[in-house]
Image (cartoon, rainbow, N blue to C red):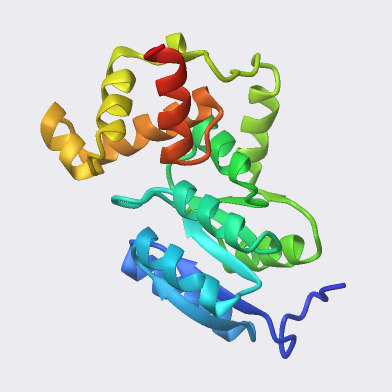
């Protein structure tokens, strides 16, 4: 069992956050607590490619990132390393983001800004085989549990804008290209994509596009 003291336990962690300042803060907390930081990344694409070779015990993953989101990155990593513990981090908590994160197999969800103690408590919990949810995330779970689940094929539940975005994803557009094409911000595109994942029961771009194509284009 992981003790309250994380020193000298040989724990390896990776941090994935496009906010460089916040990412460095997390790295500092980990190192000060005796956790080895095996790598820090600002892009999901880089993390998805390099983390499997580093074999960390836990990854702290920001949800909202340009191009490849944290949800997509987590899904790729967990398929490559099923035993990996992933803690998702976000400053913009939404039920659909929590659902999409859970669908990847992530076992932690922590809301920014968080304290030094909360971060380490989350790491201890997931390394002990448990699940960690910030209080606000726990409240969302109880609310979401009362909402009927959305099954594969419920593409009618997508808004007009979400259908437009999924159609462009299917054509291979990047988030920045979708934003430019539709005249909206890249962060708005990211929010819509996460919502689409939750509604379609998908954990990444490929799954979402496949489900959408089967049901919307058939």
Residue 153, relative to residue 20: is it above or below? above
Q: Quadrant of the C terminus?
A: top left
**Residue 123 occupies which quadrant of the picture?**
bottom right
Frontmost residue, 105 versus 13 = 105
In the figure, is residue 206 to the left or right of 141? left
Regarding residue 111, the answer to whether it shows in the image is no
Which residue is at 48% across, 69% downward? 15
Q: Position of residue 118 (x, y in %)?
A: 64, 61
Q: Is residue 46 above or below residue 149?
A: below
Residue 106 drawn above or below residue 122: above
Q: Nearer the viewer, residue 30 or 61?
A: 61
Q: Residue 169 at what x, y percent from top left? A: 30, 34
- The residue sitting at the bottom extreme is 8
Specify the quadrant of the image occupied by residue 99. top right
Quarter of the view holding residue 104 = top right
* Direction front: furthest residue: 218
In this rendering, would 39 be left or right of 160?
Answer: right
- Image position, residue 211 (x, y; %): 48, 25
């Amino acid at each position: 069992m992981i003790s309250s003291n994380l020193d000298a336990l040989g724990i390896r962690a990776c941090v994935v956050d496009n906010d460089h300042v916040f990412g460095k803060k997390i790295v500092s907390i980990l190192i000060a607590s005796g956790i080895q930081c095996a790598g820090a990344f600002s892009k999901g694409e880089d993390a998805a490619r390099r983390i499997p070779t580093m074999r960390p015990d836990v990854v702290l993953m920001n949800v909202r990132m340009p191009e490849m989101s944290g949800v997509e990155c987590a899904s790729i990593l967990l398929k490559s390393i099923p035993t990996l513990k992933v803690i998702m981090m976000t400053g913009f908590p939404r039920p659909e983001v929590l659902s999409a994160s859970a669908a990847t197999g992530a076992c932690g969800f922590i809301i920014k800004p968080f304290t030094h103690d909360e971060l380490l408590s989350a790491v201890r919990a997931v390394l002990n085989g448990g699940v960690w949810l910030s209080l606000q995330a726990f409240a969302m779970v109880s609310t979401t549990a009362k909402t009927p689940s959305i099954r594969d094929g419920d593409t009618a539940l997508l808004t007009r804008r979400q259908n437009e975005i999924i159609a462009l994803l299917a054509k291979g557009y990047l988030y920045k290209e979708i934003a430019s094409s539709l005249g909206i911000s890249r962060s708005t595109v990211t929010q819509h994509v996460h919502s689409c994942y939750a509604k379609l029961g998908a954990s990444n771009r490929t799954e979402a596009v496949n489900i959408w194509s089967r049901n919307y284009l058939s």
